[in-house]
Structure formats: structure tokens, C-alpha cells
Amino acid sequence: MIRRKAILNFILPKLKFAASSSVATLVDYLLYLILVSSLSPVASNLISATTGMLINFLLQKRYIFQLKRKVGATFVISLLSSIIGIGLGTFFIWSLNLLEFFSQHQYITKGIVTAVIFFYNFYTKRYAFERKMF
């Protein structure tokens, strides 16, 4: 029973986060694919990821995390961690695009980067809103 509860306490928050983040990720992903036809992959990612970040903050504030800081402080911490996450994601996009396969399959490239950044985002946002990492 304790083991099941521990597993639920570990998995359930990530599922809730994934559900709310899927909306922002969908906007990010679709906007990226639209922009990449006329802009560079790096510029496209910066624009799409920033848009997704703002949507994500609003959804997380309203539906996912319990606010245990002032909204302004939470937003600044969230923004800074998102900027780092966008930087990491952009670096990964740039790196993967050095390989011919990934430069020809942007939907795969963006999907891989999105999956990697998901866990970084969960733990940094959890810290921003609830003052706890794990």
C-alpha cells in the first residue's frame, strides 16, 4: 500500500503536468513547424518555445501547482528556468540539425528535444511554484 502510494505520488504529478503542458507543447510544435519553412530552425524554436512557455505558465498556475510564493517571484523563477530550458532546447535543435537525418526530419528533431526538456521543465517549475524539487 505504501509502495503504491509512493508510486502514485511520483507519477501522478508528472501526468498532470504532461496533460497541461501538452497544450503549450502542441502550440510550440505546430508554430515551430510553420515557422521553420520561412525561418531558420534556431529562430523558429526561439519564437515557438517562448510562446509555449507563456501558455504553460498560465496553465500551471491555474491548474497544476499550488502557489507557495508570490506570483511575481514565481513568474521570475519560472521565466528564468524556462529561458535556460529554451536555451538548452535550442542548443539541442542546433546540434541535431548538424546531422543530415535530423535536418531533413524536423518533426523528429523537435520531438526528441521536447521529450528531453520535459523533465527539466517539470522539476524547475515545481520548484518555482511549490519550493520543492523532488
Image (cartoon, helix red, strand yellow):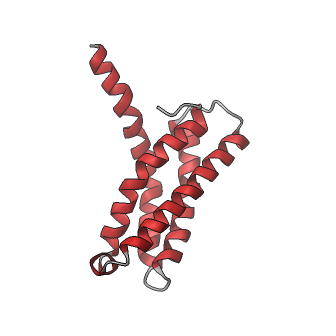
Of residues 55 and 111, the one nearer the viewer is 111
Quarter of the image for residue 115 reads bottom left
* Residue 100 coordinates in the image, percent (x, y): 29, 81
User: Taking 49 as reference, is 67 above or below it?
Assistant: above
113 or 59, nearer to the observer: 113
Question: At which x and y percent is residue 3?
Answer: 28, 18
Q: Position of residue 73 (x, y in %)?
A: 71, 41
Position of 133 compared to 16: left or right?
Answer: right
Residue drawn at x 55%, y 55% is: 55
| Residue 14, above or below 90 | above
- Rendering quarter of residue 8: top left
In the picture shown, does residue 102 fall above or below 75?
below
Q: Residue at x 53, y 43 (%)?
A: 124
- What residue is shown at x 26% (from left), y 13% (from top)? 1
| Residue 52 seen in the figure | no
Q: Locate residue 132 relative to residue 7 in the image: left or right.
A: right
Instruction: Evaluate whether residue 58 shows in this view.
Output: yes
Furthest residue in direction bottom, as rendered:
38
Q: Position of residue 29 (x, y in %)?
A: 42, 66
Give the side of residue 44 with respect to residue 105, left or right.
Answer: right
